[in-house]
Image (cartoon, rainbow, N blue to C red):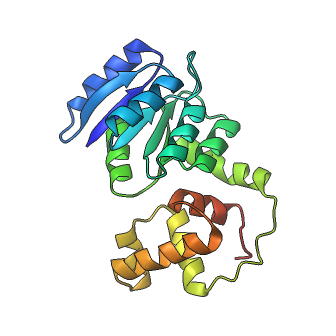
Amino acid sequence: MNIIIIDDDKLVCMSLKTILQAEEGIHVLVTGESGPEAVRLYGEYKPDILLMDIQMAGGSGLDAGEEILKQYPDARILFLTTFSDDEYIWKALKIGSKGYLIKQDIAAIAPALRAVMSGQSVFGNEVIARLPELMDSERGANLSDYSMGEREKELTRLVAEGLSNREIADAMCLSEGTVRNYLSAVLEKLGLRDRTQLAVFYLRGGWNR
């Protein structure tokens, strides 16, 4: 897979590049130091995954991620930061990023990149521990008016638990193709972009479950 690393700490960039390029199948195309540079480099290189810090002197990674996803809705963006602030986590989820990791967990980065490439969303243990409280604090609109079948609810619950399409297919005794069709139909019905936003919808209590 081809990735871009964005971090305003040059030492971090070089260390990540060295660590990740030692992993089989991972190639670092280029590194950058700011949000605006991330937007430019993404457009130029079209990487498989953009691995990016959040708080940077030259411009926020969250703002850059939002801009990139507006231009390239299928972009895979994985945030890697020292901050587990609720505001940052929530915005990362809301804009449609594929994951949020804490920098101290270096060993988790390469597996996370592979998981994102396989279509999963990835969140570090510290972030996952914050999600229930965060979702409760963000609970707002009553979305129970959506007419969702039991299979659609079950699929969404499994997506929220982080299962892949293959694992969902096994759990629901369906083919992967049927799972993909169900997932596409649910996303369209709810006006959501991807499985990350669907997981957030479920965790916020989008319907009475």
Residue 105 makes an appearance in the image? no
Residue 180 vs residue 163, the one in the foreground:
180
- The relative height of residue 122 versus residue 188 in the rendered view (above or below) is above
- Which residue ends up furthest to the left in the rendered image? 24
- The relative height of residue 72 versus residue 38 in the rendered view (above or below) is below
Residue 75 vs residue 43, the one in the foreground:
43
Q: Quadrant of residue 165?
A: bottom left
- Relative to residue 69, is residue 27 drawn left or right? left
- Relative to residue 200, is residue 139 drawn left or right? right
User: The N terminus lies in which quarter of the figure?
Assistant: top left
Residue 26 makes an appearance in the image? yes
The residue sitting at 40% across, 82% down in the picture is 178
The residue sitting at 78% across, 57% down in the picture is 139
- The relative height of residue 67 versus residue 146 in the rendered view (above or below) is above
User: The C terminus lies in which quarter of the figure?
Assistant: bottom right
Image coords of residue 73 (percent x, y): 49, 51
The residue sitting at 52% across, 25% down in the picture is 36
- The relative height of residue 147 versus residue 167 in the rendered view (above or below) is below
Image coords of residue 175 (percent x, y): 34, 82
Q: Quadrant of residue 169?
A: bottom left
Q: Quadrant of residue 54?
A: top right
